Image (cartoon, rainbow, N blue to C red):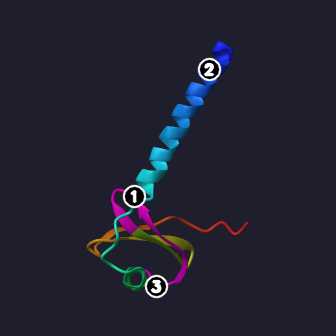
Amino acid sequence: MTRFARISATLLAGTLVFAGAAVAATSSAPKPRITMAAARAKALHLAPGKLISSEYENEHGWRYSFDIQQKGHVQEIGIDGQTGRVVENKSEGKVDHD
């Protein structure tokens, strides 16, 4: 095996190990205490409209994130999955209809 091939194989192996660790770290989300349905109801109460996306994500802590289409803009509501507190309530701007 050439020196270049050994270096390439070593770098590839290190990259795969690092990528595997990153996937393992992100797939271990804590079980939320608040249900998705309860968080969704709270979000729609704060920003009535059409729910266009929802997810449980790790953004400065684990939370539910809801994008709600309202007249002329999309409102993003973040609900903490452990406490049910509102952690984000902001407009994301107009929707592009292209």
Q: Position of residue 80 (x, y in %)?
A: 32, 70
Helix, strand or loop under label 1? loop
Residue 86 location, quadrant? bottom left
The image shows residue 92, relative to residue 68, as above or below, that is above
Residue at numbered disc 1: 59
Q: Is residue 48 magenta?
A: yes
Q: Is residue 38 magenta?
A: no
Can residue 49 be seen at all in this image of the molecule? yes
Q: Residue at x 50, y 64 (%)?
A: 92
The image shows residue 65, relative to residue 11, as above or below, that is below
Kind of residue at disc 1: Glu
Quadrant placement of the N terminus: top right
Residue at numbered disc 3: 48
Residue at numbered disc 2: 6
The disc, 2 or 1, on the residue closer to the chain's N-terminal end is 2
Can residue 70 be seen at all in this image of the molecule? no
Asked if labels 1 and 2 touch by Cβ distance under 8 angstroms, the answer is: no
Q: Position of residue 57 (x, y in %)?
A: 43, 63
Q: Residue furthest front?
A: 1
Q: Which residues are magenta?
A: 47-63
Q: Residue furthest right?
A: 98
